[in-house]
Image: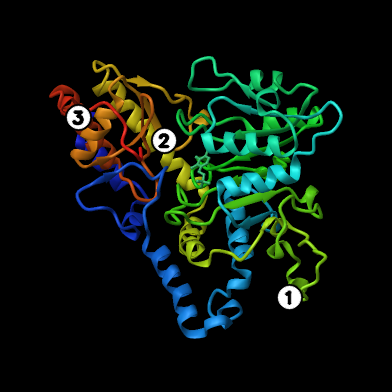
């Protein structure tokens, strides 16, 4: 069969054992949604778990903290337990709390202890701005100048990082390292195991931002000895806009006092003693601050149930097939139109999305949207396309690339301005 035909895509869908999950999600009508790496879609189970939490408020009022199917007082811990298999951690090493940026602040406030010669933080020049802002402000909090104390590893090609160069940056003056697991633009996976070992050999603590890897690839954070990690749950984990995030702290560090404390940092048995001396929980729960945002956490219950059913391995296998297929189509169909395939081609180095660069990326993304395909534009010239294992099909990929080809052949993108919208 012709590998570039629709029949071929149909055949792949027919063989796909995860295809049954598509009907578990609300797919926008007449739309091919390829933006699940920015905001995952709502599933029926996430909707139902949100309604259950609302219902326990309706029925029990304040007693919802301890009653109902999901007593609120223990929900952050319970969801942490359910997240553990996705990142390769012990259940107590995870807590669902905060947001990516808040959790980064919490972890840096805890793990960044400049002392003697070791005063600097090592990051990279391709990371998401929020992470960089948080690191800069944490450095200022300690009385240092971010211009001299935040070291950013350079990228040679503007898309990817080289692990050897990161390791070369682990010099004597570095106290802490914060890196992404998967780069948000190019989708490159960094070798977390190798980087963690190199950091520890040099007596440096290291943490990772898993926003673009959690729910997309498997991890072994505990085994790799990663000190800490943090993420959001609204991308591949489909827990909804602004949903509560999560964090990991290795059990080696249990018993540390959190940098930013609050009454939810407490050991739960004594929290309501209302003492003015904090007794922190002896697990990742210590990194909570205040009352959990229950309604923004509730959809994760239903979503994680599906991840538990399928397992991250199978999702990753399908995701690789989807991105490989998309890459094949891009190479075959779009090679005359000025696109650069800017994600790593090697499977083990590639996260869950495909990244194309083009001079007209902004107008191409607008044309895609006008033609029923939802991509993700990243300034100045990037197009991210994320076929999601849970709800995208091979035919989605086929149609999206056909539509993109038509936009290029007929120059439809010329009808749109090559500038970004407020939200891109
Ligand atoms: C999505 C994302 C964020 C978002 O942070 P929030 O605190 O959830 O707004 C931060 N860092 C990276 C790498 C991301 O991909």
Q: Is residue 351 left or right of residue 322?
A: right
* Secondary element at tag 1: loop
Residue at the extreme left of the image, as rendered: 410
Dot 1 surroundings within 10 Å: few (below 14), some, or many (20 or more)?
Answer: few
Sequence-wise, the earlier of marks 3 and 1 is 1
What is the CA distance from the residue labelled 1 to the residue labelled 2?
45 Å
Q: Is residue 272 left or right of residue 29?
A: right
In the figure, residue 198 lies in which quadrant? top right
Residue drawn at x 65%, y 22% is 166
Sequence-wise, the earlier of marks 1 and 2 is 1
User: Does the beta carbon at disc 1 come under 8 Å from ligand 1?
Assistant: no
> Which residue corresponds to mark 3?
416
Q: Is residue 329 visible?
A: yes
User: Does the beta carbon at disc 3 come under 8 Å from ligand 1?
Assistant: no
Q: Is residue 3 visible?
A: no
* Secondary element at tag 2: loop
Q: Position of residue 278 (x, y in %)?
A: 80, 63
Q: How is the image coloured?
A: rainbow
> Which residue corresponds to mark 1?
272
User: Does the beta carbon at disc 2 come under 8 Å from ligand 1?
Assistant: no
Please, is residue 395 above or below residue 377 in the view? below
Sequence-wise, the earlier of marks 3 and 2 is 2
> Which residue corresponds to mark 2?
353
Residue drawn at x 73%, y 75% is 272
Q: Nearer the viewer, residue 423 or 317?
A: 423
Residue drawn at x 62%, y 72% is 73
């Amino acid at each position: 069969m012709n590998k570039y035909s629709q029949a071929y895509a149909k055949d792949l869908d027919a063989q796909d054992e995860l295809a049954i999950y598509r009907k578990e999600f609300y797919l926008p009508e007449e739309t091919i949604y390829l933006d699940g790496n920015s905001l995952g879609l709502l599933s029926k189970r996430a909707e139902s778990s949100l309604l259950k939490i609302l219902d326990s408020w309706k029925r029990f009022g304040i007693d919802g903290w301890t009653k109902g199917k999901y007593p609120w007082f223990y929900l952050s811990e319970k969801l942490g337990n359910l997240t553990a298999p996705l990142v390769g951690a012990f259940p107590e090493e995870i807590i669902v709390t905060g947001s990516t940026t808040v959790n980064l602040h919490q972890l840096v406030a805890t793990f960044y202890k400049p002392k003697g010669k070791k005063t600097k933080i090592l990051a990279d020049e391709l990371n998401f701005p929020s992470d960089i802002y948080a690191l800069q402000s944490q450095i200022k909090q300690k009385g240092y100048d971010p211009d001299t104390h935040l070291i950013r590893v350079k990228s040679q090609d503007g898309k990817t990082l080289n692990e050897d160069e990161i390791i070369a940056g682990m010099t004597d003056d570095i106290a802490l390292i914060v890196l992404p697991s998967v780069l948000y633009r190019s989708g490159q996976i960094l070798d977390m195991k190798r980087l963690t070992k190199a950091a520890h050999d040099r007596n440096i603590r290291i943490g990772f931002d898993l926003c673009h890897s959690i729910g997309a690839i498997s991890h072994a954070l505990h085994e790799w000895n990663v000190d800490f990690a943090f993420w959001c749950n609204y991308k591949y984990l489909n827990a909804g806009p602004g949903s509560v995030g999560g964090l990991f702290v290795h059990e080696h560090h249990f018993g540390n006092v959190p940098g930013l404390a609050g009454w939810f940092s407490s050991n739960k048995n004594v929290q309501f003693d209302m003492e003015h001396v904090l007794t922190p929980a002896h697990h990742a729960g210590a990194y909570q601050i205040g009352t959990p945002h229950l309604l923004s956490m509730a959809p994760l219950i239903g979503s994680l149930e599906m991840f538990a059913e399928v397992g991250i391995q199978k999702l990753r296998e399908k995701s690789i097939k989807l991105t490989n297929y998309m890459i094949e189509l891009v190479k075959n169909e779009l090679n005359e139109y000025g696109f650069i395939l800017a994600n790593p081609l090697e499977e083990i180095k590639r996260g869950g999305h495909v990244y194309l660069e083009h001079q007209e990326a902004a107008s191409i993304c607008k044309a895609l949207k006008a033609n029923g395909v939802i991509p993700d534009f990243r300034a100045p010239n990037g197009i991210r396309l994320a076929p999601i294992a849970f709800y995208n099909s091979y035919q989605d990929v086929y149609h999206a690339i056909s539509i993109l080809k038509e936009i290029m052949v007929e120059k439809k993108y010329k009808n749109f301005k090559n500038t970004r919208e407020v939200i891109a």
